[in-house]
Image: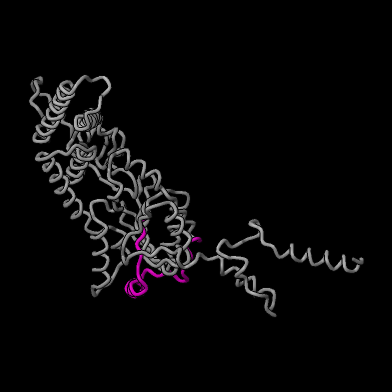
Amino acid sequence: MGLLDKAKKMKQDDEAKATKVTPEMVLVPQEKPKEKPKPKAEPEAKPEIAEAKQEAPPQEAKIEMPSGKRFIPKSREEFLKFCENLSETFNGMMRLSAAIGKDSYIVGLLVKNGVVVGASFEHIETKELIFGDDAMDRIKDKFTGTKGSLGIFAFTEKEINQALETNKQYLIKPPVPLDVIGLKITSRINEWAESRMKSGIDMGKIISYLAPESEADRSDELKKRLSVPDGFDIVNFARQSKVGTRKSGRLEELKKMRMEGVKEIKISREALTTAGAKPEEIDEILKNKAEEDEIGKLLKSGAKFPGIGGIGAKEERLAELKKKRDEAIEKLRQRMKSVGEEPEKEKPEGTMVKTSIDALYELVKKYKQVKINEALVRKLSVSKVQIEEWAMILEEHNLLELHYPTFGEPEIRFKGKD
């Protein structure tokens, strides 16, 4: 082969190598080299624009959300996909809330195609309400660098257009992209899931941002508002209207849960917690129940059980465990019947005996805010259901406030004067 032929061959090899696409060179994961269009006689800027458009997530990766339904991601992957589409395709309502010092704020954002088109800003304590461009300025001023709760509800194209018609006084000119606000959405799915599992709550029962109200109720309410003559209103949505009615309904629900527990107490961590069992009681009951089940299986199979003799010994141990379980459940049942009735105690004349509800109030007064968690359950020796019920009663007397965060346990805040 002559030098000219060798030079041609080397040039062809170099060109072939240049066309190979390595993983480091691929900018768009969805793009496959074999599908790359053939170069056309167009200005060089055109392919760059076309390639930039391809960086958007493919259609099948978008999250389809039911009309008017709060978006709750079921996995980290779903959360990330949603965030990818939020600033480009999302239509709906976003509700932000934050407590900064002693002040509480609620923000309503109307979003169309990932751009904020309407806003309201309300200071809860002073009842100050501003909207439109002024609201956006206040949001940037107050919410920068703070942490808060976020609720997201999706609208259809028709619903978002209806909402724009009935919220003209809240509109922003020009609209503001979400990324300009500096809103950073952080997933707390793993943290929340872990707390749910520790508390023994069924992961399938997702608690809504408005905890006393179901997702279905919220969706129905949203659709109802969109269909009334006055139409959908950003401020009413952000305020969680009818809070008093919802909490009143929740109070009745809690009482019902507690009283139903008297009739039948199932052997599960969630049911025992609802029934008012202490953490150490729950552990003991579940431990004995597990041993019961194991011995029961061995009796059926005829297999040997370490540490226990023949069939007679197994049956004797099983009877002992069942007796312990029945006694523990009966103790719970009797305790639940007398919830709210403090036992008679000898006391010096002229003194007052503090009840458990008094102890709850004193704790909240001391620490200003407490979460309804396992630590509080152990401290007061009552169930979470009972604590939540007491908090609502004290809230009705304007002494405490009960708040439901996006994730985690309800929080009780002190409202009275020191």
- Say if 51 sits above or below 243 in the image: below
For residue 102, which quarter of the picture?
top left
Front residue of 365/211: it is 211
Task: Report the residue that reaches farthest toward the front.
Answer: 302
For residue 2, which quarter of the picture?
bottom right
Left or right position of 193 against 313: right
Query: Magenta segment: does it hold 171?
Result: yes
Q: Which x, y percent locates residue 306?
A: 28, 22
The residue depicted at 25 percent of the width and 33 percent of the height is 377
The residue depicted at 19 percent of the width and 32 percent of the height is 300
Q: Which x, y percent locates residue 250?
A: 18, 50
Q: Number of labelled discs?
A: 0
- Say if 35 sits above or below 378 in the image: below
Q: Which x, y percent locates residue 7?
A: 87, 66
Task: Report the residue that reaches farthest toward the right.
Answer: 2
Magenta residue span: 151-180
Query: Magenta segment: does it hold 253?
Result: no
Front residue of 216/290: it is 290
The residue depicted at 26 percent of the width and 51 percent of the height is 211
The residue depicted at 13 percent of the width and 32 percent of the height is 329
- Say if 298 sits above or below 40 in the image: above
Is residue 380 in view from this perspective?
no
Is residue 327 in view from this perspective?
yes
- Say if 165 sits above or below 388 in the image: below
Front residue of 72/125: it is 72
Front residue of 245/122: it is 245
Q: Quadrant of the C terminus?
A: top left
Q: Which x, y percent locates residue 36?
A: 62, 70
Q: Quadrant of the N terminus?
A: bottom right
